[in-house]
Amino acid sequence: MMRMRRIYFITGSSGIAAATARLAAREGAGVFFAGRDEESCRALAADLPGSHFRVAELTDPAQVRGAVEGCVERFGRVDALFNVAGISGRRFGDGPVHECTVEGWEATLDANVKSMFLVCREIVGRMLTQPPGADGERGAVLNMASVLAFAPEPRRFATHAYAASKGAVIGLSKAMAAYYAPHRIRVNVIAPGLVLTPMSARAQDDPEILEYMKVKQPLRGGLIEAEEVARAALFLLGEGARNITGDVLTVDAGWRVSGS
């Protein structure tokens, strides 16, 4: 039997999302990605001949539906969903809960949880109607959390709306995993430490944080490369993880166990 090409839908077009799209394309997968920034979407598409994208506001149900329909029209199905897109709400007023603004809370939860819910709703609904692939699966979902959801760092990363949003991602993903397992749809979570992406620009420009990361993420001795997270993501989304669901894979270079 001829092996079907795996089709990936990825939210976001920079950082971990872009690294994952590049690795998936390198493995011969079909790649469709969606994000709000047209410039970065076009730049990534130019690097990945044969890929397709849709510029979309992922907190808008109609735009999410349009993006998913675009993927299905192009490739016929979705085998793997990686929900990467999200924000740090610091610029909107996220911080310790007694200082966090309502705008900061709402912007962060919308971008990190509502968008994920909307994309999952559209794609899982389609996966349920798909015949299983050669590996017996209808699809695999991977949602982006953060080590900050369960290993807080109160001095330098006191963004409580962000932590709450990533905790919500884990809770929803585990509930989804339990419900959809009988339908042959897997749902997992990846929770990185501090990664070299555009979202971590503040940390990258702070000498104190960079020095702290040498001991907080001792396996790396600094920030984690986006491609290292992407490799772990592709494993969880791929056929090699067909018996894994409801799990949280932490890619944190030792953050949780550093004791710092």
Image (tube, rainbow, N blue to C red):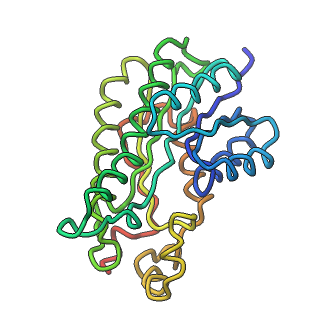
State the count of labels. 0
Foreground of the two, 151 or 32: 32
x and y percentages locating residue 144 in the rendered image: 44, 48
Foreground of the two, 110 or 77: 110
Q: Is residue 260 left or right of residue 191?
A: left
Location of residue 179 (image quadrant): top left
Location of residue 176 (image quadrant): top left
x and y percentages locating residue 110 in the rendered image: 37, 45
Q: Is residue 120 left or right of residue 34?
A: left
Q: Quadrant of the N terminus?
A: top right
Q: Is residue 149 left or right of residue 134?
A: left
Q: Is residue 165 above or below residue 242?
A: below
Q: Is residue 233 left or right of residue 113?
A: right
Q: Quadrant of the C terminus?
A: bottom left
Q: Is residue 237 above or below residue 215?
A: above
Q: Residue at x 59, y 18 (%)?
A: 133
